[in-house]
Amino acid sequence: MIVMKDVYKKYPNGVVAANGINVEINRGEFVYVVGPSGAGKSTFIKMMYREESPTKGDILINGINLATLRNKRVPLLRRQIGVVFQDFKLLPKLNVYENVAFALEVIEESPKVIRKRVNEVLALVGLTQKARMFPNELSGGEQQRVSIARSIVNVPKVVIADEPTGNLDPDTSWEIMRIFEQINALGTTIVMATHNKEIVNTMRHRVLVVDGGMITRDEDEGVYGYES
Ligand SMILES: Nc1ncnc2c1ncn2[C@@H]1O[C@H](COP(=O)(O)OP(=O)(O)OP(=O)(O)O)[C@@H](O)[C@H]1O
Ligand SMILES: [Mg+2]
């Protein structure tokens, strides 16, 4: 599903944020990406949806080689990947329903499909009753649920999340994690960067430890831990 081969990333300021990453993530896996601040977790994730490009190396997402992917084909890639951010990134002038529908409107889905899918995913994240509310009328946890709904509405094969519980209190974080578990149980691959030790050690999944731009550990059912 996701393959990185000898991936190296040097930012224009000279910082090396990926220093020889080799990894394979299979269909249906749930993978945590942990490691100290500045380790390169966000860079690793951004390269998967081509927010950043590697300086060297190959990245394949579901058979699409990002190195040779033309810019005009990036929307094709984005259709296979849902992305969830720490700060939600909802459109403030659109209500919940519209925020989620937008992801399908840009790919020109039919109004009938849009209505059906948006209602399905809003039900999945438990927001049917709040469809007409605006982002600033919602709690942080609700906003994150909208952003998860948006990320899965076009049925991507992979959902990538960068610290999705980073701005949420512990109880709300668990609610959000249960939604990710549910999405994963439906067959979607999940890659999640997190600093949340309790979550990683309780909802056990594969753990990649990133440090100094390298994967220093890779364990199934791993625990949160790294030398820093
Ligand atoms: N756009 C950029 N330009 C230059 N350097 C950058 C850029 N983005 C990140 N870096 C640097 O690359 C390194 C890795 O950053 P990255 O954001 O990937 O770390 P991280 O593991 O996600 O950290 P955190 O846990 O704090 O989110 C850091 O040294 C950072 O300063
Ligand atoms: Mg980060």
Image (cartoon, rainbow, N blue to C red):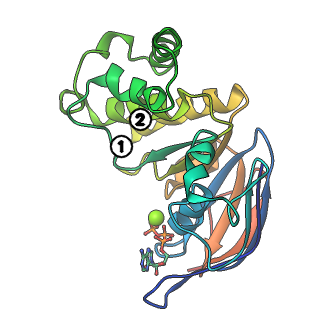
Question: Label 2: which residue?
Answer: 147
* Crowding at mark 2 (Cα within 10 Å: few <14, some 14-19, many 20+): many
* Residue 213 position in % (x across, y down): 61, 78
Residue at the image point whose x is 61% and y is 77% from the top:
211
Residue at the image point whose x is 40% and y is 41% from the top:
170
On residue 218, the disc is none
Question: Label 1: which residue?
Answer: 88
- Left or right? Give the position of 6 relative to 174: right
Q: Quadrant of residue 101?
A: top left
Which of pointers 2 and 1 lies earlier in the amino acid sequence?
1
- Left or right? Give the position of 150 relative to 10: left
Residue at the image point whose x is 41% and y is 35% from the top:
147
Residue at the image point whose x is 68% and y is 50% from the top:
31
**Residue nearest the observer in this picture, 168 or 1:** 1
* Residue 46 position in % (x across, y down): 53, 61
Q: Are marks 2 and 1 in contact (CB under 8 Å)?
A: yes
Q: Measured along the vertical axis of the image, is residue 122 above or below residue 116?
A: below
Secondary structure type for disc 1: loop
